[in-house]
Image: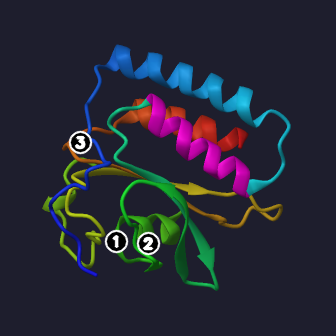
Amino acid sequence: MSASAEMPYFIKPSVNLTATEKEAAYVRAHAAIQATIGEEEDELLKMVTINSLLKTFLPYFYWVGFYLVRGEQELVVGPYQGTLGCLTIQFGRGVCGAVAASGQTKIVADTHALQQGKEHIACDPNSRSEIVLPVRRRADGSLLGVFDVDSTLTGSFDAVDQRWLEKILATF
């Protein structure tokens, strides 16, 4: 199945927020996540809840989800909301694979400016900017996966997103 540039009827294009609006949206999203998750320990339930609430509160989140480590050098799509995600990604390939390999958050202002197939994997050509964060939830500190968020607009993500998403992922 190849990606199409036509957005499905059920997907809304991204809407960027001002810095003030973004802070307020994250405050509300974080509170909703904490209130909903509470003392829940099941990682799958937490991932699903985080995806749903972030996509609800942040209108520039076009695709949001987790890619989980399988084996030693591969990510597989985990819980997400949005259009079809890539099923597997090799470490070092694309933005998600680069973050899995390096363990460092990456913000991309324009994914279309990256070398396609190597620096960026176009699972959906409507995705124009992206932030990917490593997720370290295992007891030994090893990588559980990466958290990926895409927007249909360029320049959607910045240090505000990084700070809040790191905070949310740290408490999950």
Question: Given the image, on which type of amino acid does mark 1 rest?
Answer: Gly
Q: Secondary structure at mark 1?
A: helix
Q: Position of residue 156 (x, y in %)?
A: 27, 38
For the record, the magenta segment spans 44-57
Q: Residue at x 44, y 72 (%)?
A: 97
Inspect the image, locate mark 2, and give the three-letter code of the amino acid beneath it: Gly
Q: CA distance from mark 1 to mark 3?
A: 23 Å
Pinpoint residue 43: horizontal percent, then vertical percent. Answer: 75, 55
Residues under numbered marks 2 and 1 in contact, where contact means CB atoms less than 8 Å apart: yes
Q: CA distance from mark 2 to mark 3?
A: 25 Å
Which of the labelled discs sits on residue 97, or is there none? 2
Earlier in the chain: of badge 1 and badge 3, it is: 3
Label 3 secondary element = loop
Magenta residues, dominant SS class: helix
Which residue is denoted by mark 1 in the rendering? Answer: 94
Q: Which corner quadrant holds the C terminus?
A: top right
- 163 with respect to 10 (left or right): right
Give me the C-alpha separation between circle 2 and circle 1: 5 Å
